Amino acid sequence: SEIAVPDPASTDVHQSLNNALQKRPEIQAAEKHVEAKQNQIGIYRSEILPKVRAEAGYGWLDEEFFPKDEDWYVGISLDIPLLDGGTRRHRIAKSKVEVSREQAQLDQLKLSVQQEVWSAYSRWIEAHQSLETSRVRQRQAEESLRLTKARYEEGAGTINDLLDAELSLDQADTGLNTARYRLYLARVAFLLAAGEL
């Protein structure tokens, strides 16, 4: 029994492209790389800003002698990065370049995945058409064998004609099975490319 494979014409290839761009693990990983580099820029920018710290404490000044004196303190400090030789700004600029590079790689990867989906879809269409052609050939070979047998039984055909017709049917059957196998492979390749497997 033949496993049913849907007609590629019934598939919304644009939806499959969107699925691939959302579900393919290599795209998800590349998007995480871009996000990590963007977060790094935020960290470096925060190093340029002044930092305010507040401190407070409470305790006893002297615990060994009487009277015990209470001690408490409160303080605020402000760190303003003045001179760092442009190190922080250089790190920010370098991170921006890295973000641009990661984004370019992500964009290239998305184009590559889209091309892969379209190619797999095209191969699936070709395999489907090849299967239809193989089915026609197999039906023609069956009919040819039927007619050749009838002629042979009436004495109008030779044994060689009958053997040739049987060989043609065997070849058509083999071609049909090969076309089915190729169709299954093409369908699986498309589903993999679309991120659906």
Image (cartoon, helix red, strand yellow):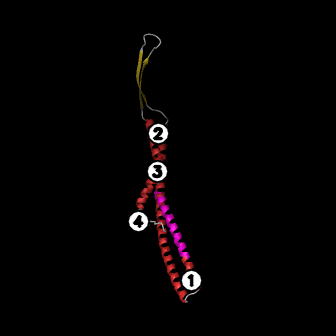
The residue furthest top is: 66
Element carrying mark 4: helix
Question: Is there a contact, CB below 8 Å, between mark 4 and mark 1?
Answer: no
Residue at left 49%, top 60%?
A: 116
Magenta stretch: give its range. 170-197
Q: Residue at x 50, y 68 (%)?
A: 180
Q: Earlier in the sequence, mark 2 or mark 3?
A: 3
Q: Position of residue 12 (x, y in %)?
A: 40, 62
Compare residues 122 and 91 and report the one nearer the observer. 122
Residue at left 48%, top 55%? 109
Specify the label residue 162 is tagged with: 1
Residue corresponding to mark 4: 10
Classify 10 Å Cα crowding around label 4: few (below 14), some (14-19), many (20 and above): few
Q: Is residue 72 magenta?
A: no
State the residue in front, 102 or 123. Answer: 123
Q: Amino acid at mark 3?
A: Gln
Real-space Cα separation, disc 2 to disc 3, in angstroms: 30 Å
Q: Which residue is mark 3?
A: 28
